[in-house]
Image: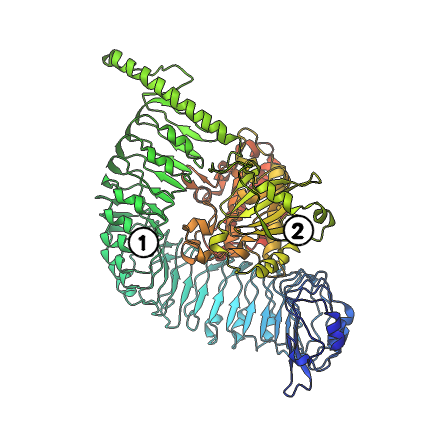
Amino acid sequence: MINLSKALVNNTALKWDETKDPCSWKGVKCTPGNSSITEISLSGVFLSDFLPLLCQIDSLVSLDLSNNSLTSIPDNFITDCGAIGGLQLLNISRNMLGGTLPTFHGFVGLKFLDLSFNSLIGNIRLKLEGLVALKSLNLSFNRFTGPIPTNLGKAMALEELQLSKNFFEGGIPDQMIDYLNLTLVDLNENNLSGPVPVRIGDLSKLGVLILSTNNLGGKIPETLSSIKSLSRFAAYQNNFEGPIPSGLTRFIKNLDLSYNKLTGSIPSDMLSPPNLQTVDLSYNLLTGQIPLNISPSMVRLRLGSNSLDGTIPSATFGTLEHLMYLELENNSLTGSVPPDLGSCRKLMLLNLAGNKLNGSLPGQLGGLSQLQVLELQSNKLVGEIPFEITQLPKLSILNMSWNSLNGSIPSTISSLRGLANLNLQGNNLSGSIPRTIANMDSLIELQLGGNQLSGEIPRMPVKLQIALNLSTNHLEGPIPKSLAQLTGLEVLDLSNNKLSGEIPPELTQMQALTKLLLLNNQLSGIIPKLSPYLTFDANGNKYLFNASTPNTSPRSAKKGKSVAAGLVIGFAAALFTVGVVIVVTVSISRRYYRVKDEQLQSAEDLPPPQVLQGNLLTANGIHRSNIDFTKAMEAVADPSNVTLKTKFSTYYKAIMPSGSSYFVKRINWSDKIFQLGSHDKFWRELEVLGKLSNSNVMTPLAYVLTVDNAYLFYEFAPKGTLFDILHGSPGNALDWASRYSIAVGVAQGLAFLHGCTCGPILLLDLSSNNIMLKSLKEPQVGDIELYKVIDPSKSNGSLSMVAGSVGYVPPEYAYTMRVTMAGNVYSFGVVLLELLTGKRAVSEGTELAKWVLSNSVKQDKWDRILDSNVSRTSLAIRSQMLAVLKVALGCVNVSPDARPKMKNVLRMLLNAR
């Protein structure tokens, strides 16, 4: 052990002291009395080479080398460790192992082998046949091919088999059923096909069976219902067909058969077993009614997107005190919303959208004190909005659009202080918009279009971002100047009302605005000079005209000279106002057009930030010699060096004394939501990220800590962001070869981050704004450090401020409040849709993903989704774009479980060539 200590003398993570008993060293365990070493754990200590000395400890029982940077398993390691008869556990997971699997000779006592989260390839064949005592095998998250291995120890002692997220193909081998001690089988996300063997019922000890995301078909075996120990069965996203066998859930607690082709009705006994907790049958072809008897232990029930009919069983739900998620959307359910749903006190999500429900809403829903999402849109509901619903303390999303609701909007709606999305459009609501609506300081989307609302437009919540839609009502009076305070708003639609007066020049200050719709009102005067990037439509306003063109609008002779005189005066006043706006606009445009105008001191008045600590993270000699911390801080003191501002970061261009350019990024909000608490921990987190090596990931090269902020250094990307290239230059369409290269590059970067050996690195905010371009075919994923240094739970901002950019936030975030790999896949899917359609993530008040999903129901209409400027270039390009669209649709699936993992997304994109 002393020799081993010397080999690790420079390892700061271990700090082994040669003067002390090895049994006291970190990661080392011994027998009672400290006579022999039995366990060594070197997990996460930055090992890059195997240590042959480890296998000279013949008393070793457990060896953990996980979460390091090991790249291959040397032959002498297999030979020496294989000779240790008492070695029972070998964990080399979460490393960088490549190549084929070595043949494991010896290891006669090995019971647990974990090689997951590596990059091993090839066919396993007989390489594990000699592991006679093997009980647990985990090869997940690799690149193995060929058939499922069946020669896994002659003693047939195997209990756990985890082979998920590889490229195994063929059928589920019948020989696997011979391992009668199996308790866990995870074959998720491979290329398996064919039926599930009927003999699977012989695995009488099986507790978990996961077959999801394959190409398996045929019927669900009835023999599964005989396994008394089976608590979880997941087989979503396959091609299973036929009816669901009766008795399947007799012993199961968690069942997921979503995204298959199952037909027939739901068996009457399927939802009733007392132990049943979660059932997901969504996205199948099921018909008939919802069974009357539902387990009192039910936590989540998902039956959406089938063809179920009949009513929602009323009395049943009054007893479901554990139910948290109920999703029955997109069926043909009739009748009223059951008042008994109000007794489900733990309910967090209620989705009944897209049915044929009628009648009025029961006030009992106000008893759902934990409810966060309420979706009732696209039904036939009538009556007034119950006061009780406006008292739900945790509600984040409320959608009652496209019904026949009447009456006024309750003034108590402002009690929903946590509400982020309110959609009441397409009803028969009347009266004025409550003035108290301005107090809803979490609201980022307000849809009130298509009603009978009247009166003037009141002051609006200042954090609105996605859209403010008040179109097709009876609103009158002027457009309020206070709307200019909505600096984050992207879409403003006031069309088809009775609004009068001039368009306030103050609206030109709304720099985030992408669409302004004012058509069919009674507006007059001169149209202010608007941004060239703004989609603007004010047709149908008789007395509204541009300053650059004569007023040719028809006018009644009765208006006479008074109208003409008024217009002249108004024209002069408007010219003055436009002049002021132009001066302001020119001033602002000197900075990057998407950087918000801030009141900053000049470079002469603002001293450079004082460096408290600066460290280089990169081993690259060129960068280490180029980076000058003092020069960089001078650059960040000058606001003219700002090149980009995102939700979480501000980017500066810093030119070093050598002439090389770098990005210096300040992390915004660092005073509020740094979770690290110390400079040392901050350094350790960034040190790990600085060692990453992937051409499609922006890895930090250095960092500087000042009194108030943290600054990170990156290579400069001369082409700017993907958002700039796609949406910043109208008329200059990016060719498909570049778009495809960008898609593949971003997928490679994201797949690398998700499979990182130090553990998955998630992106807090993935959007086209955070993808930098070194060239038109070389993208880099940015902001990789945010998930490490920002704690969303400590943010006091709005929902979207934590989850990411509007339009990219996965739908499940509203009720999970968790950043996940599946959520990152959704955000990437939106980026893919941007590349395919040329549209922004939010367009005309509608999120791009929702628009594409609604227009993709019929595959023969997919051509309409694609950017015609690109797709019509050639049949080959059109074909490839359609193939990529299929990948994108999978990514933006509303079900997180149904989305492919990034590794598979990358594979599908490469196959689309």
Q: Residue at x 52, y 74 (%)?
A: 206
2 vs 1, front mark:
2
From this view, report whether residue 738 is shown above or below residue 302.
Answer: above
Image label count: 2
- The three-letter amino acid code for the residue at tag 2 is Asn
**Please, which residue is most extreme toward the right here?**
76
Number of residues whose C-alpha sits closer than 10 Å to that of mark 2, classed few (under 14), some (14–19) or many (20 or more): some
Tell me where residue 245 appears, x and y as whole percent.
Answer: 43, 66
Is residue 280 or residue 489 the one in the foreground? 489
Which numbered dot is residue 847?
none
Compared with 622, 300 (above or below) is below
- Where residue 710 appears, x then y in whole percent? 56, 51
In the depicted view, which residue is nearer to us: 623 or 605?
A: 605
Disc 2 secondary structure class? loop
Residue at numbered disc 2: 694
**Residue at 46 percent of width and 61 percent of height:** 257
Q: Could you tell whether 735 is left or right of 76 in the image?
A: left
| Type of amino acid under label 1 | Leu
What residue would you read off at disc 1? 333
